[in-house]
Structure formats: structure tokens, C-alpha cells
Image (cartoon, rainbow, N blue to C red):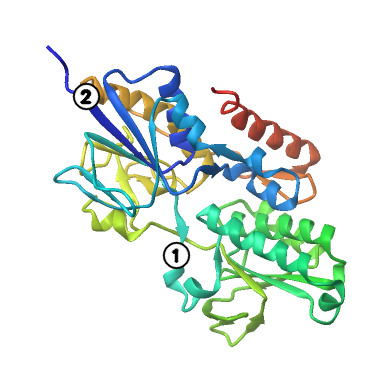
Amino acid sequence: MTLKMKKLILIGGGHSHAILLKKIGQFPLINTQVILISNVKKTPYSGMLPGYIAGFYSDSETHIDLITLAKFAQAQFYLDQCLGIDLENKKVFCQNTEPISFDFLSIDIGSTPDQNLITGAKKYTIPAKPVPQFLQGWNQILTTIKVNSEHIWVKNPLTLGIVGGGAGGVELALNINHRLSQLLPENQFKINLINRQNNLLSNHNQWVSNRLYQLLLNEKINLYLGETVEKIDLNNIICQSGLNVNCNFIFLVTQASAPPWIKNSGLTTDNRGFILINPYLQSISHEFIFATGDIATMKDHPRPKAGVFAVRQGKPLFENLHRIINDKPLKSYIPQKNHLALIGTGNQEAIASWSKFGCQSPLLWKLKDYIDRQFMQQFENLI
């Protein structure tokens, strides 16, 4: 008797799926066709992105080649944008491909800042995520610097705005500052950081918040705290208080959101549109759907949207997909409550944040660099 071939579709090339594909290459899923759908051929590793912005890493050092990874896993690769899912008929709809049927589906597409919260943000800002869109905007800035002669910036300094004072926004400000200081004299650029709250990094301890506040001041980055951005138009950030900050380019590093097609598909989500999952990394409403990384929220164990959690979900995701395909009971995965955050300060130092503990050292940058390179090394020389 011939068993029916099962079909597993992976939407997105996030950190969990990268680890999953490597595991499938090492331990193939028997009698299962695997398809990866991604709108990019190379996926960036978020842990090294600030260092890439600062100029410490090359493009190849910070990106995972999804085509090579798919080949290693003997998976088909579709370069396409997912538009939606038909949960009743188990079909995925993409921009440039006919509907694809599936038996099991895993989603790992990350998140993006909610551009609908601020008037004009969608049109006039560079969102921090998705990373390929962010990098396109960053490269445009580098090109603008390159094609214009120095005297232009003497009269009108290059001015950048960053909306959002969480870890992502602060780390971005410091690393952009380092890179621009290599390209332009100090008086030819300025960076503005606007944050709705009166303090920075509200999800971290007071020492970390205060230390990064001081570092930003030391680097002469303009801080506007307690300012709610109401509107963004061409080259202007307009706040409810009446503050108007002029910027050539504006980055949006605010609260994460999910694409509308997730909720529209009928999957049960949290109040921000992220897929609610159980301890098996499985949708609480549809057992044949799995989700990991930023796009997912663990119903009973919610955690911050951080790359460290996506990385650690890769292995249990593989185990549970293997089990459900083979009709075996699934295994629970409960993420750790606290995680070590290593925040790069743009000068090859890093700040460690762990619960109520915080410290800064060049040794912490070396530790972060080692961890990040070890993660990326596992995807080298696969075929």
C-alpha cells in the first residue's frame, strides 16, 4: 500500500524556519513534500543588522541564502509574496503563483511597525521591518551621501529622524551615528530620536535605560522624550505638542503589527493581529497551522517580540512538525521567562540587559559577535 505524500508549506524565511530547514536537511521528513515561500532570496539575521549598519559586517555575513538552504532540505523554493490562506480548503494564495494546496502549514514572517497609527507614516517613513525594505531605505541614504559633494552638507546637514525609543530605535540611532561619523564630519549630519514615553527602553531595567540615555547625549543625538508623533509628512515629524522636527529621512521603529491577511484568513489572533499559538507552537484554532517568531503570540506564555525567542523555537518546531506528520503526540515548549539582551552601542561595545542587571563592556561586544557568528556559521557550506 502506497502512502499519500503529505505537503508541508513554510511561509517566510525567518530564523525559526531557517533552523527548521537545516534540521529537515539533516533528518528528512519521510513521505513529505516541503515548499518554502519567501519574498526574498536571502534573509537577514536580525542579531547582526545593527553591526551591519555600523559597517562592522558585510552583506554576505549577515544574510542566510534561502535558495541554498531549501536545496539542502530538498524543498521547493517559491520567490513570491503570500496574500492569504483558505483554511477550509487548505490552500495558500500568492501574488504570482497559482493557489498551492497543503496538509500542514508553518508561518514565520516576522512583524512590521504599525504604520497606520501615525498619519503619513506609510508614505513618508522607512519601517525598521521588514528588513529588506529597511535596507533599501538605508542604502538610499548611503547613495545620497555618495552622490552629493561635501559642501552640500555644510549648508544643510543630513538630518535623520527615528521614531521609537525602545531597544531597536536606540540601537539603530547609535549604529547609524557610528557609520555616518565615518562618512561625514560631525557638523554635517544630525540624528533626532523621538519617543512617546518619558524614558527610553521601557521594557528594560533603569540602569540600562539611563546608560543608553547618557550614551545618546554623549554622541550629540537629539532626544525628544514624552512626545507623541501625530503626523509625518515629507521631511517633517509633527507631534501633538506642536513640536516639528525637520528630517531628510525618517525611520519608524515603533510597536510591531501583523499583516491584515493573517486575521482575515480566520486564524485566531491576539488584539494586535498576531497568531495565537499553544505550547506546541500550533494555532489554537487550527491544529494543522504552526507559527513562530514575531508573527506568533504564545497564549499562555507571552514573550517580547525578540529574535532570541524565534531562534529557540526552531528545534521544537521541527520536532512537532515531524510528530504531527507521523501521527505522534506533540511535545510542549515553554520559553524562558528572562533573556539576555546584548545591545550594540555602535563602537564595538555592548550593553548587557538581564532582568534587573545591566553592564557595558567591549568584552560584551566580543561575546555578541561570537554568538552571532556561531549562529550564522551553521548555514555555511551546506551543499
Q: Quadrant of the C terminus?
A: top right
Task: Name the front one of labels 2 and 1.
Answer: 2
Q: Is residue 41 positioned above or below 113 on the image? A: above
Residue that badge 2 annotates: 5
Q: Is residue 228 positioned above or below 88 on the image? A: below
Question: Looking at the picture, which amino acid does disc 2 mark?
Answer: Met
Residue that badge 1 annotates: 114
**Residue 90, picture quadrant:** top left
- Using the rendered image of the protein, determine whether residue 383 is visible from the camera's viewpoint: yes
Query: Residue 30 got which mark?
Result: none
Residue 44, position as x, y percentages in the image: 56, 44
SS for tag 1?
A: loop
Q: CA distance from mark 2 to mark 1?
A: 40 Å
Q: Residue at x 58, y 26 (%)?
A: 378
- Using the rendered image of the protein, determine whether residue 337 is visible from the camera's viewpoint: no
- In this rendered view, identify the residue nearer to me: 107 or 218: 107
**Residue 180, picture quadrant:** bottom right
Q: Residue at x 63, y 41 (%)?
A: 62
